[in-house]
């Protein structure tokens, strides 16, 4: 009986040792076997591209000439020898002198020509992006801010024209809405690049073009042609044509 007990104990120990060895071997194999990396899901359109990942060949250079021409319009005569800056200066002067809101015509003229000032940051930022296309986040935030301010003033002017009893501005509003739609299409097409600069630049350019076409089409209902009007229309046409080409390329290359 003692012999049988001894054999049984020996068998049990041997089985336990074998089980332990097998478990250790499995653990060793699991530890030494490299884990297979799971392929990352393609980003594609699901995630917006940043400036750091933007292809080097995407440049703001094509928009440089149209946006510099837009800046030149600020200093050219539009109506009665006055530049777009004149109504803004008159509004500020009247506001400081009377410390009250100027009367209707002064306020209206300043509201419709005020967005022309967008040409200053637009031209400067286009130059900056043409030389160094890696803007900071603060620059993009500032670009979106001035763009929204400009387009808001333009939409208010459109509402003022539509609310008037006269229908002579309806064609102007229709043309402006077409340009506004083109600008909105450009921003939507480049929306996945909103964390980079192309979307903001197209939005700024479109905002200036929308206000400029509204102003020029209204002026041409009662004013003669002038150097400023011709230059503004050329700038608008160039911005639209070049903008469409840029959006069509950037939306796929980005």
Image: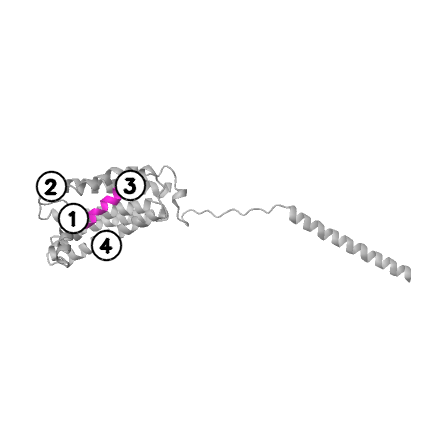
Please name the residue that numbered disc 1 is placed on.
215
Q: Position of residue 156 (x, y in %)?
A: 20, 56
The numbered mark, 1 or 2, whose residue comes first in the sequence reads 1
Decide: few, some or many residues near mark 2? Use Cα within 10 Å; few <14, some 14-19, many ≥20.
some
Q: Position of residue 131 (x, y in %)?
A: 32, 37
Q: Quadrant of residue 95?
A: bottom left
- The residue nearer to you, when weighing 49 against 15, is 49
Q: Check residue 226 in the rendering and tell me which mark sits there, or answer none.
A: 2
Q: Secondary structure at mark 4?
A: helix
The numbered mark, 3 or 2, whose residue comes first in the sequence reads 3
The answer to whether the residues at label 1 and label 2 have Cβ atoms under 8 Å apart is no
Image quadrant holding the C terminus, namely top left
Asked if the stretch drawn in magenta spans residue 115, the answer is yes
Cα–Cα span, label 2 and label 4: 27 Å
The numbered mark, 1 or 3, whose residue comes first in the sequence reads 3
Task: State whether residue 197 appears in this view.
Answer: yes
State left or right for residue 6 relative to residue 184.
right
Magenta residues span 113-124
Image quadrant holding the N terminus, namely bottom right
Cα–Cα span, label 3 and label 4: 22 Å
Please name the residue that numbered disc 4 is placed on.
152
Q: Secondary structure at mark 3?
A: helix
Q: Check residue 126 in the rendering and tell me which mark sits there, or answer none.
A: 3
Q: Residue at x 23, y 54 (%)?
A: 152
222 is higher (above) or lower (below) than 3: above
């Amino acid at each position: 009986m003692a012999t049988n007990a001894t054999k049984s104990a020996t068998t049990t120990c041997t089985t336990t040792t074998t089980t332990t060895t097998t478990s250790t071997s499995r653990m060793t194999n699991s530890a030494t076997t490299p884990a297979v990396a799971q392929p990352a899901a393609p980003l594609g359109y699901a995630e917006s591209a940043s400036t750091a990942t933007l292809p080097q060949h995407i440049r703001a250079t094509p928009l440089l000439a149209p946006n510099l021409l837009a800046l030149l319009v600020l200093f050219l005569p539009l109506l009665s020898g006055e530049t777009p800056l004149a109504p803004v200066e008159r509004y500020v002067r009247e506001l400081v002198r009377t410390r009250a809101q100027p009367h209707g015509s002064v306020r209206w003229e300043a509201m419709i020509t005020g967005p022309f000032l967008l040409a200053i940051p637009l031209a400067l930022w286009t130059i900056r992006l043409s030389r160094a296309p890696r803007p900071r986040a603060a620059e993009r935030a500032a670009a979106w801010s001035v763009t929204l301010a400009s387009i808001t003033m333009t939409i208010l002017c459109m509402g003022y024209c539509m609310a008037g009893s006269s229908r002579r501005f309806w064609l102007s509003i229709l043309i402006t809405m077409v340009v506004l739609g083109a600008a909105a299409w450009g921003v939507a097409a480049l929306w996945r690049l909103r964390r980079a600069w192309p979307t903001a630049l197209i939005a700024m350019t479109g905002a200036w073009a929308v206000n400029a076409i509204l102003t020029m089409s209204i002026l041409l209902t009662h004013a003669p042609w002038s150097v400023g009007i011709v230059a503004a229309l050329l700038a608008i046409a160039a911005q639209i044509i070049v903008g469409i080409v840029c959006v069509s390329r950037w939306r796929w290359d980005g």
